[in-house]
Image: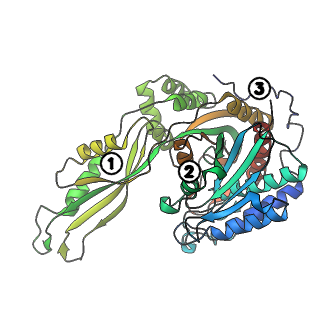
Amino acid sequence: MWKLSSVLLCGYVSLRAASLLPPEADQRLARSIYAEMVESKSGFSTGATTPIAQAVAARLKAAGFPEKDIFVGGASPTKYNVVVRYHGTGAHKPILLLAHIDVVEARREDWSMDPFQFIEKDGYFYGRGTTDDKAQAAIWVANLIRYKREGFHPDRDLIVALTADEEGGGPYNGVDWLLKNHRDLIDAEFAINEGGKGEMINGKRIANEIGLAEKTYADFRFEVRNKGGHSSRPVPDNAIYHLAGALYRLSAYNFPFQLNEVTRAYFEQLSKIETGSLRADLAKVARGDEQAMERVARQSPGMNSMLRTTCVATQLEGGHAPNALPQLAAANINCRIFPDDTVEHVLATLKKVAADDQVLVSIKTNEGKAPPSPMRPDIMKAFAQVTDSMWPGVITVPEMSTGASDGRYLREAGIPTYGIQGFFLDRDDVRAHGRDERMPVESFYQGQTFLYELVKRLSTAN
C-alpha cells in the first residue's frame, strides 16, 4: 500500500518555507496564455481549436523551441492539435502532459457575463474553459517554457499535447487521431491529464485527488413509434405515454452497488477527513457494507455515482403537431458504466426496466472501456510528497472519475494515464460545463507550482 501525505522529501528542498506561487514572471506568462486561450472561441460544435494551436506554436518558437519539435495538425482544418517535445537524456520513456483546448458551448444569454471574455474578479478567473481544461493547458505551456529557460535536463523527454474535441469526441477527437496517425509524437511511458482535483470546504483544502480509472460513457435510445391519428380521438396506445411509463420506471431503478480497488481506497481515504456518522459509514463502505453504501448514496449524488452504474434521461423528442397523436416519442438515456460492468449488460437491464414491448431500447453511443491505471509506487509517492510539501495535512485520494476524458483512448492504447491537476475548488461549487465557470486565482497559480514540481520529480532520477 502506498504511503500518503506524511512522507519525507528524500533529498528535495521542502516548499513549505518558500512561496507556493511561481516567480512573478512565470505567473504573468501563464496568465497571458490562459487569457488568450479562454478568449479564443473553441466550442466543440461552433468554434475552432486551430487558432489556439497556432498561437501556442508561435509562443514556443519564440521561446527557442526548434520547429522540428513542434507539430500542428489534425483531422480537420478547424480542429488542429499542437504537440511539442522537450528533449531529455532519453534514459527513460517520455511523459505525456495532456490537456484539451476545446470547450463545452456557452451562450451569452445564459451567463451573467461574456463567457468568452477572460475576467478576473473577486479572487476568481471567469470564462468558459477556466476549469475545463484551459487552466492545465496554459500551465503545461508556461511550465515547459520555464524548464527551457532554466536549463532543466530531465531523464526523459517531456511531451505536451493540447488537443481538439475532447468534449465532442467523434472523428475529430485529437487524442484518437494522434494515436491512429502520429503515435510516435505522443507515445509515452505514462500520461498526466485532467481528472484529479483538489477539494476545499469553506476555503480549506482537505484532499487532493489522483484519477486512476474512469467509467464507460454510453448513450442509449428509448424509442416508441405507432400510427398516431387525430388528437380529437385519443386512444390508450399513445407513444408519449409508453415512453413516459418507461422513463418513470427508469427513474425509480438503481443499479447494484459495486466496488473496485480504486473506489475502496477512495472511500477509505475520505473516511479520514469526514466527521460524525458519515466518517464511520465511509469506512464501512470501503469494507463492502451495503447498508452503509445505501446511506452514503442517498446523502451524496457524487458518492452514489462512485458506487454504481448510473443511467439518466437527458433529452426528449416526440410528436409532429399539436393537434395530432404522436407517431414518435423518444429519449436519450446517458449512462456512466462502472468499469467492471459492460454496455451489453446495461442494455439488457434497460430493456427489463422499460418493461414495455412498445419501447425499443438501442445503443446510440458506446465510447468503449479502458483498464484502470496501476497505482505505480513512484507516481503515487511523488504525488503525495508534493501535496504534503505544499499543503501539509491535505490527504491524497485515489479516484475513479464518474465523467469521461481522453485518458480512455490512452489507457486503451497501453499508455497508463493519471488524472492530476492540483487545482483546488470548493466541493459544492464546481462549475465546469455550467454557468459562470470560474477558477480561484490562488488555485490556478498554486496549481502551476504543483505541476511544475511534480513533473520535475517524475522526470529525474530518484
Q: Report the Cα–Cα distance between label 1 and label 3.
A: 46 Å
Q: Coloured how? A: rainbow
Which amino acid type is marked by label 2? Asp
Residue density around tag 2, few if under 14, some if 14–19, many if 20 or more, within 10 Å: many
Which amino acid type is marked by label 3? Val
Q: Position of residue 409 (x, y in %)?
A: 53, 48
Residue 111, placed above or below residue 418: below
Image quarter of residue 30: bottom right
Q: Report the Cα–Cα distance between label 1 and label 2.
A: 29 Å
Of callouts 3 and 2, the N-terminal one: 3
Q: Name the residue tied to disc 2.
A: 406
Q: Name the residue tied to disc 1.
A: 251
Of callouts 1 and 3, the N-terminal one: 3
Residue at image location 66% in from the left, 39% down from the top: 189
- Label 1 vs label 3, nearer the camera: 3
Residue at image location 74% in from the left, 47% down from the top: 158
Of callouts 1 and 2, the N-terminal one: 1
- As drawn, is 172 to the left or to the right of 333? right
Q: Is residue 293 visible?
A: yes
- As drawn, is 304 to the left or to the right of 240? right
**Quarter of the figure that contains the N terminus:** top right
- Label 1 vs label 2, nearer the camera: 2
Which amino acid type is marked by label 1? Ser
Q: Position of residue 217 (x, y in %)?
A: 44, 49
Of 396 and 383, the residue lying toward us: 383
Give the SS element for disc 2: loop
Residue at image location 66% in from the left, 52% down from the top: 185
Tag count = 3
Q: Position of residue 51 (x, y in %)?
A: 67, 71
Q: Name the residue tied to disc 3.
A: 7
